[in-house]
Image (cartoon, grey):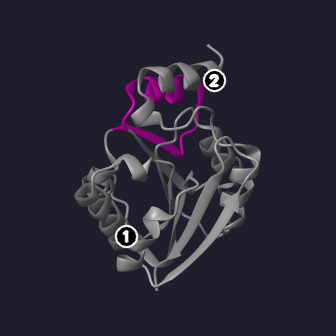
Amino acid sequence: MNSKLVFFSNFLKRPKEVAAITPSSRYVIRHITKNIDFNNAKYIVEYGPGIGNITEELLKNMGPDARLVCIESNKKFCKFLDDNIQDRRLTVINDSAEKLESYIEKLNINNIDYVLSGIPFSLIKKEIKKDIIKKTEYVLREHGKFIIYQQYNGHLKKYLDIYFKKISTEVELRNIPPTMLYVCEKI
């Protein structure tokens, strides 16, 4: 099945889980990838990869020994990723971002360089949102980055400010819906 059709049908079935009508545009992907030093990135985690359009771009740019761990709560998206992306550097996990620590421990990964998130934080309960952000900051290496892309909505900054001292923001209007990007660096 066409990747955009898979995405759209999952949006119709679970709008609060998917939270966007279309996958991230190439413009959003450019904003994300320009913030990643692929020459020095050994471990990258992606929350909510959906159909994998960002995942594929990451894999194109990552080094041969780098690893990408995708955590996706939607079973259909996980199956789509498993069926359509064959790369030994990729691990797809069907679960919640809240459980990041247990999975990276099982995979014997530490000092994560980048965590990317497309999950709809605006639809997540306050306690869970804070827990995900806290755990993400904890697993990042020094100067590692948490890059969040979501619908244009400034609500998340107050939560990010609790755990990150260096945050930059970008807006991409050429996306449906317009997208806000937060680049949070652990210092």
Q: Mark 2 points at which residue?
A: 3
**Tag 2 and tag 1, C-beta contact below 8 Å:** no
> In the image, is 6 to the left or to the right of 10?
right
Q: Where is residue 26 in the image (x, y as percent from the top left)?
A: 75, 45
Q: Inspect this view and state whether residue 58 appears.
A: yes
Instruction: Tell me which amino acid carries mark 2.
Output: Ser
How many residues crowd mark 2 within 10 Å: few (<14), some (14–19), many (20+)? some
Give, as a single range, the part of the protein colored magenta.
73-94
Tell whether position 83 is magenta.
yes
Residue at horizontal 29%, vertical 64%? 130
Tell whether position 129 is magenta.
no
Q: Earlier in the sequence, mark 2 or mark 1?
A: 2
Q: Where is residue 16 in the image (x, y as percent from the top left)?
A: 40, 35
Residue at horizontal 37%, vertical 61%? 109
Residue at horizontal 35%, vertical 65%? 133
**Nearer to the camera, 127 or 35:** 127
Per the image, label 2 sits on a secondary structure element best described as helix
Instruction: Tell me which amino acid carries mark 1.
Output: Tyr
